[in-house]
Image (cartoon, rainbow, N blue to C red):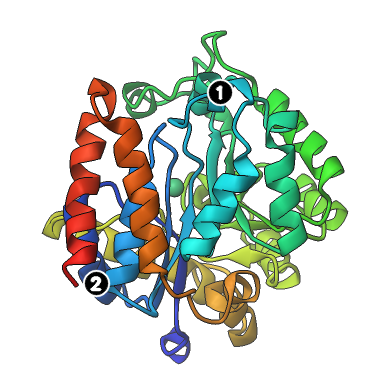
């Protein structure tokens, strides 16, 4: 294990949900022994998570990548009247390193009402594909989330039970993705949480074989428990596809207790699983180097893009105008006002 501790880690899947949390990001990186992070913004029908990513870039230059989220608060967005390619272009111009979509999670998919392969998104995917921009994409969830017998109480409490007839099935979501991959075969996609394919190793491999630009991140969910049940085959899978697998944690900065949970996830769960030959995969150093950051840098750049402060402040100001007087956006507006103050005071 110790022979790999010097490999620099890039965590491709970190979230920030408040202005305060941005200030704790440095502590998170230090605690987890992570050299760089990718802040994955979530849509939230707002610009606010983009602003957290922007502020994170400003506070920790050179260490923070940020994948932007589409903003459905723009009038007409849900009716196909907004050109999402334009939104992406603006985010990339201000310094985003890629895009993040959570739109394939069943609740959000229901909320937008937009199929993942809808023509509404065509110009957006096309723009990403043409410019080699990576997309971190959450599609579906573990299969137990649809199963009334097997879903856990915790998942029900989170409101993530999808077997109520109100949400698309896992197969239906995957079928939408198949449609989009057919239209945009060169789109660089990292599917979060192993694309929830850890129950079927053959299928997991077939997807990667059929789609050379599709990748998986290993951000925890349930898959480590599935890997543990078939260690040897999965170890071979990881060795074979080590150029298609990305290290991620879903960590988000917070108080001391949270930081400690994050440290444990990285250093006591994920890393030993990949590195330890006795209890996990015991992957070779060069495979680990790819998974721990090489693959991500190949797609997102050797270093994070520089923030264009003027464009970032402009984008925040546009949202502020749109949010003005809207009760449902009041908290986000307040957060963005504080962020702009911090950005311009520097
Ligand atoms: Zn996540």
**Residue 235 in the image, given as x and y percentages of width and height:** 65, 66
Give the position of the N terminus as an image quadrant.
bottom left
User: With respect to residue 285, does 167 lie above or below?
Assistant: above
Q: Is residue 51 left or right of residue 167?
A: left
Q: Residue at x 20, y 70 (%)?
A: 27
Residue 189 percent coordinates (x, y): 68, 54
In the image, what residue occupies the spot 46% across and 20% down? Answer: 161
Residue at the spot of label 2: 26
Q: Nearer the viewer, residue 109 or 285?
A: 109
Which one is in front, 221 or 97? 97
Q: Is residue 24 visible?
A: no
Quadrant containing the C terminus is bottom left
Q: CA distance from mark 2 to mark 1?
A: 36 Å
Q: Is residue 315 visible?
A: yes
Does dot 2 land on a helix, a strand or a loop? helix
Q: Position of residue 253 (x, y in %)?
A: 25, 58
Badge 1 marks a residue whose secondary structure is helix
Give the numbered dot on residue 78: 1
Residue 39 at x, y percent in the picture: 41, 59
Q: Nearer the viewer, residue 164 or 92?
A: 92
Q: Is residue 173 left or right of residue 285?
A: right
Q: Is residue 42 left or right of residue 292?
A: left
Q: Is residue 232 left or right of residue 26?
A: right
Residue 196 is tagged as none
Residue at 34%, 23% (x, y): give it. 153
Residue sitting nearer the eye, 321 or 106: 321
Q: What residue lies at 55% left-to-right and 28% top-to-bottom?
A: 77
Check the image and report above or below for 61 versus 176: below
């Amino acid at each position: 294990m110790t022979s790999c501790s010097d490999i620099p880690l890039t965590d491709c899947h970190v979230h920030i949900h408040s202005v305060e949390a941005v200030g704790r990001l440095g502590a998170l990186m230090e605690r987890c022994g992570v050299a760089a992070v990718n802040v994955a913004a979530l849509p939230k029908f707002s610009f606010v998570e983009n602003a957290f990513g922007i502020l994170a870039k400003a506070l920790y230059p050179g260490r923070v990548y940020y994948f932007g989220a589409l903003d459905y608060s723009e009038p007409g967005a849900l009716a196909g009247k907004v050109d999402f390619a334009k939104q992406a272009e603006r985010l990339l111009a201000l310094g985003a390193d890629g895009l993040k979509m959570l739109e394939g999670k069943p609740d959000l998919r229901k909320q937008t009402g937009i199929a993942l392969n809808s023509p509404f998104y065509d110009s957006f995917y096309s723009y990403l594909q043409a410019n080699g921009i990576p997309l971190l994409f959450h599609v579906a969830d573990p299969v137990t989330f649809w199963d009334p017998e097997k879903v856990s109480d915790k998942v029900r409490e989170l409101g993530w039970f999808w077997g109520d007839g109100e949400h698309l099935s896992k197969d239906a979501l995957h079928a939408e993705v198949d449609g989009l991959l057919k239209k945009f075969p060169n789109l660089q996609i990292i599917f979060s949480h192993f694309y929830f394919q850890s129950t079927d190793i053959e299928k997991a491999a077939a997807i990667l074989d059929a789609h050379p630009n599709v990748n998986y991140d290993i951000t925890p969910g349930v898959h480590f428990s599935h890997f543990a049940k078939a260690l040897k085959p999965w170890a071979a899978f990881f060795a074979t596809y080590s150029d298609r697998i990305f290290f991620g944690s879903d960590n988000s900065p917070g108080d001391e207790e949270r930081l400690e949970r994050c440290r444990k996830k990285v250093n006591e769960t994920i890393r030993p699983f990949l590195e330890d030959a006795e209890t996990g995969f015991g992957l070779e150093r060069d495979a680990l180097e790819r998974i721990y950051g090489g693959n991500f840098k190949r797609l997102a750049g050797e270093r994070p893009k520089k923030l264009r402060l003027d464009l970032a402040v402009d984008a925040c100001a546009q949202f502020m105008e749109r949010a003005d007087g809207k009760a449902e956006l009041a908290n986000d507006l307040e957060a963005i006002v504080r962020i702009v103050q911090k950005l311009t005071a520097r």
